[in-house]
Image: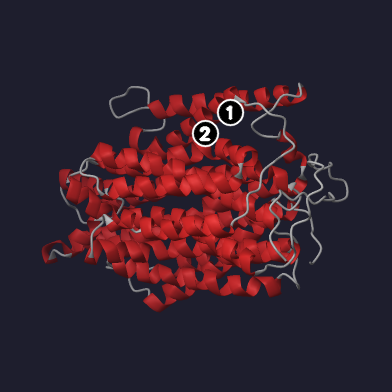
Amino acid sequence: MSIPQADPNPHTTPGAGEPAAPPSSGSDAPAPPEHIDKRGWLALACIALGVSIVIMDATIVNVALPVVIKDLGLTAADAQWINAAYSLVFAALLLTLGRLGDLRGRRRLFLSGMILFMAASAVAGASTTAPMLIGSRLAQGLGAAMIVPSTLSTLNAMFSGRARTIAFAVWGSAIGGMAAIGPLIGGWLAADASWRWAFWLNIPIGLLIVIGIIRAVPETRDTATAPGGDPVGVALSALGMGAIVFALIEGQWFGWWRQDNGSISPVALALTAGIVLIVAFIAYERRRAAAGRPALIDLRLFTLRSFRSGVIAAMIVALGEFGLLFTLPLLLQGSLGYSALGTGGVIVALALGTFLISGMLPRLSTRMSRRAIVQTGLALEALAVAALALTVSTTIPTWLICALLFLYGIGVGMATAQLTALLLSDVPPRQSGQASGIQSTIRQLGSALGVAALGGLLINQLTNATQHNLAALQLPATTTDALTTAVSQSAGTAIAELQTSPERHDIAQAATNAMITASQTTLWIAAATLCVGLLLTLSLPRTPTP
């Protein structure tokens, strides 16, 4: 069976007691297929590779960043903005570009985003100054914001039934797997090649994706929406989300309320402005829809129980999942003596777990409901993180870390894709672009919240524990303060340098123990957050076994 070229629109039936779904387009286009033919598999591979390149790029850059700082002579602020610029544009424009794909064509948006992402990667790899690199990261963030919602909404429109279960399993495993493989590739490039290839690697992969888009990915769009734009809604959503994500990312740098010099922090102003803008955006969209005018998002999507409960659970899960991925590399490289390449090698165990379970999900979905699969995955994630918090020490064997990461990867593979499929299950395919943009934005918000909350907790605990452990050595107060500052401001990476000095053995041991203590606390909180996400999935509707 060939893949339909027109935008499919199967009718969905809400569960008992649920509000009716937002109206469908009323198109007579054929329903999406429930099995995948040769062209469908090629399109699915292209889409999975497209989202993989975005995820992989972010993780590669994180590992290669120390080498970039040294090579270009970046300041700490420059280094922070390399990632912040990408995250800001990505989060701010997901909603707008997801809806643009619905209206103008998701395949067209996917193709344009990939070309822009490749061009920005070429410039980033050739960068010689901080402004040049930060500017190219802004462009990469724009390209990524075009790619992610268009891939997800295209899957939702292309497939149904068992084919959709398989498609989301492949999409989710691509995200989870590449998030784990990225550090390994980044460590290898930083150690044996050049950090510039962390960006240039996107070009040959991107060219393959472009060929696949042209040859196999069908064009889908929302043909029922009345013509017209919503420029005010676009501005309110972009500025509001950008301000909130800026505040969450920069809170630790500028201070949440006051800067070191006593002046009001721009973070407080940005957070307040962002919340006000988002509230204004919701009110404006509601009035615009009531008047029958085109709106950026259809707020009636939140009347769907599966969508409403799913996006809330997705945000909490994203916050908790970030706790492990943020803490573990710092712990391994800063305190346990692993190199960047070695850290990437350990985290590959997570990818193996994700890839393994992704191949089993289609068969598993015939025996378990989607909700049960999501709940099992989240339970495995929480169990793995809690076990790591319980066993982490300076003598923890590598095999145990890998085993727990493998278990965690199985949980990620089960939960990520199926939670996405579940929250989109009652969304009409014609509205899947904006629904995908909403869920991707909320996940990004959860990740940024994880940076602020769990990252801030790690640094705070590290500072307090280092101060306490060094004070027990009865060092001069000025020495204790200086060492504590060096350890905390480097997020623990300065501990590795202390460990290389035999005369500082006691100091290095005190700092290492502080990092272990801080990591345990952060991991316990991450496990608890995943448990909260698990409890929230109880509000998801029970779906019949396919």
Residue under label 2, please give it.
241
Q: Amino acid at mark 2?
A: Met
Q: Residue at x 38, y 71 (%)?
A: 346
Which sits in the foreground, 444 or 163?
Answer: 163
Judge whether 259 appears above or below 492 on screen. above
**Relative to 353, 102 lies left or right:** right
Kind of residue at badge 1? Ile
Which disc is residue 278 wearing? Answer: 1
Position of the N terminus, as image quadrant, is bottom right
User: What's the CA distance linking mark 2 and mark 1?
Assistant: 7 Å
The colour scheme of the drawn protein is secondary structure
Q: Position of residue 68 (x, y in %)?
A: 24, 51
Q: Residue 26 placed where, x, y %?
A: 82, 42
- In this orientation, does residue 329 appear? yes
Residue at image position (26%, 36%) is: 131
In the displayed image of the protein, which residue is found farthest to the right? 16
Mark 2 and mark 1 residues within 8 Å of each other at the beta carbon: yes
